[in-house]
Image (cartoon, helix red, strand yellow):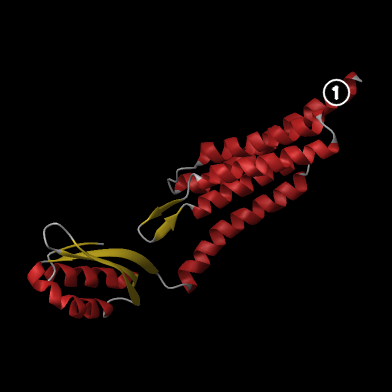
Amino acid sequence: MEELNQHFQQTDIWKAATSIVAGVILGYERESKDKSAGLKTITIITVGSALFAILSQNYSGKGDSFSIAAGIISGIGFLGAGVIFKEGFTIHGLTTAGIIWVSAAIGMAIGFGEFYIGGIFLITTVIIVHVTRLVGNLVIPNNSTKALRITLNAEKAEKRFDIIDRIKKYTIYQNVVKTERNDNNELIIDIEVHVRQKDIRTLEEFLFKSNDIHTYVI
């Protein structure tokens, strides 16, 4: 019996060590990009998921093990949602949330003793993160969506349609989200613009030099 217990303890130590390595590999890429969930966070998530899996496997029945695994998935979902935020018309943190989710899954696989499955999906995740970025830079145009706000003085308000048409020359497409008048009798126009990266400077030069635009923020 002592030899059997010793075997399980050694196996659990290997699981812990493997989960640390997996967490470091997954977290390094996020840390190198200075993301909110970096090396420490991803490693802790992977190790913690492995620990839950080990405990559930060692001290509960098979059915209860799957229940605990379902609880880990729900908890990781809330944690991943915390790193997602919206800035203007752009959503940030989706990739980090995805890595949090898959790191928990890999940690669970290691905790349940599925080293090969965990390793395969670890390698797959690393390949996806790095290769898709390279392919995206080569194939997908470098465009971005911006939130543009322009302010016109009251006497320039009648030129708003002409200004919007002139802005179209520098964008792929645009959408006027809101138009309102503030307390200073100025007209504020919020525009969602999809613009090529190379045209952003040209657009800003137009906005800066235009005598009809009082202020702008992009």
Q: Which residue is mark 1?
A: 5
Residue pictured at 49% horizontal, 44% vertical: 82
**Side of 81 where 216 appears, left or right:** left
Q: Is residue 171 above or below residue 74?
A: below
Amino acid found under the numbered disc labelled 1: Asn
| 161 left or right, relative to 42 | left
Decide if residue 56 is in sight here: yes
Of 215 and 207, nearer the camera is 215
SS at mark 1?
A: helix
Residue 134, placed above or below residue 115: below
Left or right relative to 79: residue 109 = right
Q: Residue 202: horizontal and vertical position, in percent?
A: 23, 72
Residue at x-position 66% and y-position 37%: 49
Residue 43 sits above or below residue 139 on the image:
above
The x and y percentages for residue 191 are 29, 68
Residue depicted at 31% across the width and 76% down the height: 171
Instruction: Please tell me whether residue 216 is drawn above or below residue 117 in the rendered image.
Output: below
Q: Residue furthest top?
A: 2
- How many badges with numbers are in the image? 1
Residue 10 coordinates in the image, percent (x, y): 78, 28
Which quadrant is the N terminus positioned in?
top right
- Decide which of 86, 7 is in the foreground and name it: 86
59 and 71: which one is in front?
A: 71
Image coordinates for residue 182, horizontal then vertical, percent: 17, 59
Identify the residue at image location x=41%, y=54%: 86
Occupied quadrant, residue 189: bottom left
